[in-house]
Structure formats: C-alpha cells, structure tokens
Image (spheres, coloured by chain):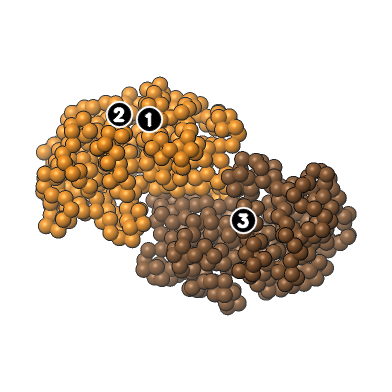
Chain colours: A orange, B brown
Amino acid sequence: MKATMLYGPRDVRFEEVAEPKILKPTDAIIRLSATCVCGSDLWPFRGLNPITAPMAMGHEYCGIVEEVGSAVTTVRRGQFVVGSFCISDNTCPHCRFGFQSSCEQREFMSGAQAPLARVPLADGTLVATPELPADDLIPSFLAASDVLGTGWYAASAARVQPGSTVAVVGDGAVGLMGVLAAKQMGAGRIIAMSRHKTRQDLALEFGATDIVSERGEAGVSRIKDLTKGVGADSVLECVGTKQSMMQALQCARPGAMIGYVGVPHGVELDGAELFFSQRGLMGGPAPVRRFLPHLMDLVAERKINPGKVFDLTLPLGDVAEGYRAMDERRAIKTMLRV
Amino acid sequence: MKATMLYGPRDVRFEEVAEPKILKPTDAIIRLSATCVCGSDLWPFRGLNPITAPMAMGHEYCGIVEEVGSAVTTVRRGQFVVGSFCISDNTCPHCRFGFQSSCEQREFMSGAQAPLARVPLADGTLVATPELPADDLIPSFLAASDVLGTGWYAASAARVQPGSTVAVVGDGAVGLMGVLAAKQMGAGRIIAMSRHKTRQDLALEFGATDIVSERGEAGVSRIKDLTKGVGADSVLECVGTKQSMMQALQCARPGAMIGYVGVPHGVELDGAELFFSQRGLMGGPAPVRRFLPHLMDLVAERKINPGKVFDLTLPLGDVAEGYRAMDERRAIKTMLRV
C-alpha cells in the first residue's frame, strides 16, 4: 500500500510501504475511513523537531476493524471504531484515574495517514459505535480521535464551569474545538483570540461570544476590558509558544486555571512569577480515551458538529499538499479521504 | 513602644518605635495577644532577600481591637480578632472568587511582632470571635493567621479529596499544618517527608500515616514504593526551593495537583517537561481570609489543635533569639508572648 512518510523538513512522501500486520495479540488492524493532518505534524514538517529517520506519519484515525489479535475482546472485525492518538491499556492506575495519556503502557499512534493502520492495545484504545455511522458523520468522528478530544481536555483541565468566562488562546483547529467544548460545558462567555476571518467565523459558529483580534499585550488588555479588569475564569492555551503561554497566563484572573494543550516549545516558567500571579496550570497530552465515549455519543446524536473544522478535504495521495496548505495557513485542518 | 526591626542579615533589633495610629478610616489598631516568627521571615534574616531599609517585622497576629477608624463596621473595640497576613477588602472580584491574597487592594501585613499593630482594611481582613477565647486557645487562633491557613490552602490547591493519597514535602510549620489540613479534608493516606524526630512525631500527631525520611531521588522512590509505583494524588509543596519543587513534581501521579505555598526561590519550570509529566500546579500566597471563619470555628470547638506547632515560646523582647532558634532548626516555630 502507499502511505505517508516524512523524510525531513517539508519532505512529505506518499510511497509504497509494507501493509501493517498484527504483531501482538492485543493489536488490531483498521481500514481507515478518513484521516487528517495534525497541527503537531507541522513541528517536524517545519524542521522544529529533529528527524533522524523517515517517520510514518498520522495519528488521528477512525475506520472499520479489519482484523484483531487473539487477545482482543471488545472490538471485532467489521465494527466502526475511533481511537485516541495515545495508545493506552485503559486498565492501569493512571488510566483508571482518567489520565490514559500517561498510561503505564503508553505509546503514541503513528502511521495513520495510510489506508490501513495497526492499533496496539486495541481493547484499551478503541471505542466502537453500535452501528456503522452515516457517511456525513465521518469527519466529526475523526475529529474525536485527537483534535476534539484535545480541545475538550483543555477545557476540562481549565475547569470550565457553567456560566464561567473562558478565553481561548490559539485559533487553530484545537483552539476552535476548545471553543466548542467550553460551549458544551455551559460557559457563559467564550472569548476567542483570532486574527483570521474564516477562523473567527467558525469560532462564532462553535459558540464564541466575543472575538479578540489583537495579540500580545494589546490582546491581554482587550480581554481585561471585556471582563471589567478581572480576567478570565478559565484559559485554554492551544498553541505552545512562549508568547501564547504568557498571553494565557496574563488574561486569566488570579485563581484561574490554564488548561494547556499546545506542546510547549521554548516555554520556561519562572516559579516566583507564577506563584505571585496565582494562576494554576494543568496540561499535557490529552487523555482523549476518557472523553471518547461521551464525544462519540454527542456526534452520533448530532448535538455537535466538530467535523466542520476540516476546511480542506483531499485524497490521501495529495497528503503533501495537505501539509503545505496548513503550513501556509490556507487551511485550518486537512482531512484526507482514503 | 518597643517592636521588632530587621536591619540586615541576622540583625534583628527590639527597639523603640512610634505607636501605630489610625491612618485611614478603614484601619484598626489591635493590641496583640500573641505573635510569632514565620518561616518566610527567615529569607531576609538569612540575607536571601535583599534589605534596603530597616523592616518592621511580623505578619501573623491575633488580639483585642483597641481602636477602629470611622468607616469600620464589622469589628469593634474590645473584640478578639484574627486577621490574614494578606490585607484584603474582601469585596473586589478576586476576593469574591476566594482569592483574597490577590485582592485588588492587597497589602502584606507588617509590624506585628509588636504590642500594637495597625491593620488596614479591617472589615475585609479581620474576623472576630463571638466572645473572648480561653487563653489556651490563643496559640491555635494565632496559627490561623498564616501558617494554618497556608497549609490549608496548599491542601485545597492540591485538591485533596476524601480517601486520597497525599504527600507533603517540607516538615516546617506550614508542612505540618498541611498534614493537619489533609487529615481534616479526609485524606486516606498522608505521607509526610521529614528527617527530624520531633517533626515526624508532630506530623503523626496531626494525622500523617507514613513518614519518609529520605530526600531527593531516594525520597521519591520511597513514595513510589508506598503507592505501588503510582505516586500521590495530591502533593503539598511547602518549602520553595528547586529541589523541593522537583521532589513534589516527581512524587505526584500524572493528573495530580501540586499545591505549592513555599515562596519559590530559584525555581524554573521547563514547559515541555511539565507538559509531558502531566502534573498540575496551583499556588501562591494563601487566601487565608477565605478559610478563616471555618478554621476559627474548628479551633473554638477544639476540633483541631494547630497551636501545637509552636514548640518554643518566648517573651516578645527575646524575639531575636526566636529567629535564631528557627534559623538553627532548634525550634519549628517560635511564639512570642506580648
């Protein structure tokens, strides 16, 4: 089969590779219904994470179970499944506390920008739907695999409460999903920071009540104005740069939690500054598996439409263009039809 | 009157100063029943915080109201009161969210190692008891002013839950109060890290279930052993050094909160490390005022005895010896009789 490999900065190749096989009795092989390009794929694509060997790309996935290993009991051939980008056993203590992304057996999914993919620890990682979903729901189920689950975790880690005021830093796909999550959690006011018209529109559609187009100090000052000088109760940091983290900390009120899900690149925090600012932090790779059953129900019942975050759909073979479109900010998020 | 002034490293003087006066209509003057030396007083005493001018020392206090300004309505002359080391109006948005230590009008109390002290924003800062308390309760009421309230906040910020496993880093007075707080909040297991017999004994008396005397990596490894490799659900960081913060982060499980109340000195946090370790942080100066009414009730009803943390009592005139005893770790915490 042909699949997506990254050889170096901006060198995405769609090339012949061996088909995945069951390697352990706990594995499953799935035939992908759709896959996509993640904002985090852009870090190595841009050369900001080192690449020492060709990487099998793709960690967001949904599809039909093709084959399961002999130890797999909860999913079977022919079922439609969604899995987290974090492989987990869902039975270890960390999983039971709801932090499957820190599972004792954690692996990160790879090789999903392909027609077939191997999913380790299938019982702990995959969730099946009761029946095959309608085609038009595929994008939303796919979103649940990472981008929606990650935005949801940001809102959960930031302890969004009914009626609270939430600020979302970052208008990428995760930030937009954070807006959707905050809305579902009953936030009274959702301030999306975005400079781009198409993203602003989508944020409003997902539930944002205010848009702040300024950045840095001007952006913080706008949020202070909008909150009568107080700051937000919860802030979702969905970028991962030093600037975005500082922005998140500064637009929060004392006692607020920052849920941070952008992988930090060059972020250093001064202990004394954090102490006296009295802001709380909780983040990390999202334990999507915790949220998957609920999110998949919301999608199946058509209560949310996170699939709208895909504003570019390409055939899998055009995956390189999918990366470029996101890199150049021509697309928010690229879905790849398999 | 004579009061305590710090002139430079290890230069504590008990010397003649002007009596405090009402400066604003919101002030109160109190006649102290007792006062004490705080662990944080040792930072400037040791020369680790710069001193540019003589400092009026002391921020933990309880006593009888001597005089109130014309705008004060909730406390009156003759009442026994306890106040937070953080002066707050208790009406601004941050106060209403329970973060009085980030009050828009915040000041830090000073000059309380003296017979009389001025308390600004008396209505927002002081809490009166219904009647004058018995003498033997004075140490426990005094503790509520800072050290108990700070340990309590550490447990609250670390989200201690009934039945949860709590680790306390630091066996100073605040750490010991953290043990007491975790016990009151229903923690199932409380692991106190302490190398000193007298402190270990007090920790056990306050509710610790386990003592870990090892430090650094060995200490972390002991806590991992005690928790079957998982780590603690909540960690109270009550020191403020780089080593103690690293220890706190490492003995927590993924998803755990670290409540940190030791003022950080030289603590830098790497964003990516914190992200992948998936530990949460919440700290800062304790909003003692939030907890004061509850803590004062617990003391009045003799349900807790935090006053036991004072293992040295001296006349106020011997305040310099009180500092030295704590600096040399001959005393956990010095109470000063006025």
Q: CA distance from mark 1 to mark 3?
A: 39 Å
Badge 2 is on which residue? Answer: A308
Q: Residue at x 18, y 53 (%)?
A: A74
Q: Eyeballing the image, is B202 above or below A62?
A: below
Question: Are dots 1 and 3 on a single chain?
Answer: no
Between A288 and B183, the one nearer to me in the picture: B183
Q: In the figure, B109 relative to B178: above or below?
A: above
Q: Amino acid at mark 3?
A: Phe
Q: How many marks?
A: 3
Q: Which mark is residue B291?
A: 3
Numbered disc 1: what chain? A
Viewport quadrant of the C terminus of chain B: bottom right
| Residue B183 horizontal/vertical position (percent) | 53, 67
**Of discs 1 and 3, which sits in the foreground?**
3
Question: What residue lies at 49% left-to-right and 52% top-to-bottom?
Answer: B281
Q: Gap between marks 2 and 1, in whole Å? A: 9 Å
**Label 1 belongs to which residue?**
A206
Q: Secondary structure at mark 1?
A: helix
